[in-house]
Image: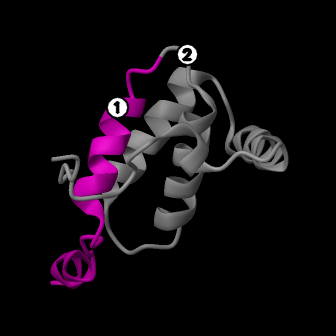
């Protein structure tokens, strides 16, 4: 019964599908770029105290191990990245959008 109650408290994050796609792209990156480090750091922050999403949390740990970086080192690295005027909009044309082509 106790196990059932703890399982019922686990939630699925509203951004699960989007975040899972990002995680899947990061998990095989041998040479992560600035945006990859930033994405991993923000996902760590998003899921740190979230009840549930064990699979995503496990994948985050796998990525850290694969990249051979600690969370502290990752956050130090991303702090430096942000301090150099990094903005996601400077690196990716369409982070979010419908993909609707208005050129015609």
The answer to which of 3 and 37 lies nearer the viewer is 37
The residue lying at 53 percent from left, 35 percent from top is: 36
Q: Main structural element of the magenta stretch: helix, strand or loop?
A: helix
Which residue has dot 2 on it?
31
Question: Which residue appears at 51% of the width and 73% of the height?
Answer: 49
Q: Provide residue 34's location: percent of width, then percent of height.
A: 64, 33
**Mark 1 → mark 2, Cα distance in angstroms:** 12 Å
| Residue 11 locus on image (x, y percent) | 26, 75
Q: Furthest-top residue in view?
A: 30
Residue occupied by mark 1: 25
Asked if residue 38 is among those painted magenta in the image, a careful observer would answer: no
Number of numbered discs: 2
Colouring scheme applied when the structure was drawn: one colour
Q: Residues within 10 Å of mark 2 (few under 14, many from 20)?
A: few
Expressed as whole percent of the image width and height from the top left, the position of residue 67 reads 57, 23
Q: Residue furthest front?
A: 104
Magenta segment, which residues? 1-29
**Between 95 and 39, which is closer to the camera in this rendering?**
95
Residue at horizontal 38%, vertical 21%?
28
């Amino acid at each position: 019964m106790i196990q059932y109650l703890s399982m019922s408290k686990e939630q699925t994050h509203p951004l699960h599908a989007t975040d899972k796609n990002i995680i899947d792209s990061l998990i095989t990156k041998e040479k992560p770029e600035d945006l990859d480090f930033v994405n991993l750091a923000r996902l760590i922050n998003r899921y740190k105290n979230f009840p549930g999403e064990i699979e995503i949390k496990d994948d985050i740990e796998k990525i850290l191990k694969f990249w051979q970086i600690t969370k502290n080192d990752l956050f130090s690295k991303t702090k430096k990245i942000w301090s150099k005027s990094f903005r996601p909009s400077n690196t990716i044309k369409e982070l979010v959008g419908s993909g609707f082509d208005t050129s015609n």
